[in-house]
Image: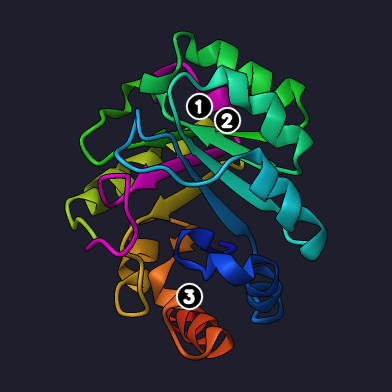
Amino acid sequence: MTFRIAPSILSADFARLGEEVRAIEAAGADLVHFDVMDNHYVPNLTVGPLVCSAIRPHVKLPIDVHLMVKPVDRLVADFAKAGANLISFHPEASEHVDRTIGLIRECGCKAGLAFNPATPLNHLDHTLEKLDLVLLMSVNPGFGGQQFIASVLVKIAEVRRRIARCGRDVWLEVDGGIKTDNIAAVAAAGADTFVAGSAIFGSADYRATIREMRARLAMV
């Protein structure tokens, strides 16, 4: 299994954002994770397409946009034009989940469906064949620096079984409280893509932290 590490710029120094994304690319990150919150679907307000467009020239890494906004469709094309490569959204934020997945793909991006810790997985019953990514939140969305919710491990294992049954190369991403000391357990449950914010941007040495995460993953 290929493992991917996606530092979340939610925990970066926004006064030096271009420098920060260049630093994580140099440190060996696989993706730039971009958290979009609207103070409506989630209780926080972060960044929009203009910021995505501003960081796009600074990195060659794919930009992984997680839309925590409602309604979602209006922003899909804007983020695609701003340089997003993957766009994930929450089923509760769309009136027509299948249509939103199609819209993301029509805009030239890979499509992901995101699930909060208490959101059931039944939306995958009719969408997994069309998805490139399933994103499981291991904290309640809205703020960085939260503790990993251990009960999500069971959910990760269930999604991994579903992906195996469908036979497609669908990424299984986990976001929330990922650190060097739990990343191996999350991988053992079935995840292959790991969003880490404060664990990386809060460390003194991004490269050393990512290297340590990869070392833990190599033992899975």
Q: Do the residues bearing badges 1 and 2 touch, measured as CB atoms within 8 Å?
A: yes
Q: Do the residues bearing badges 2 and 3 touch, measured as CB atoms within 8 Å?
A: no
Residue 152 seen from this side: yes
Q: Which residues are magenta?
A: 124-147
The total of numbered circles placed on residues is: 3
Q: Amino acid at mark 1?
A: Leu
* Quarter where residue 105 is shown: top right
* Quarter where residue 65 is shown: top right
Q: Amino acid at mark 3?
A: Phe
Q: Position of residue 99 (x, y in %)?
A: 58, 11
> At numbered mark 1, what does the secondary structure look like: helix, strand or loop?
helix
Instruction: Give the residue pinned by disc 3.
Output: 201
Q: Amino acid at mark 2?
A: Leu
Quadrant occupied by the C terminus:
bottom left
The nearer-to-camera label among 2 and 3 is 3
How many neighbours does mark 3 have within 10 angstroms: few (below 14), some (14-19), or many (20 or more)? many
Q: Position of residue 71 (x, y in %)?
A: 47, 18
Q: Position of residue 22 (x, y in %)?
A: 71, 73
Instruction: Give the residue pinned by disc 1.
Output: 128
* Quarter where residue 149 is shown: bottom left
The mark that comes first in sequence, 2 or 3, is 2
The nearer-to-camera label among 1 and 3 is 3
- For image coordinates 75% across by 21% down, the residue present is 106
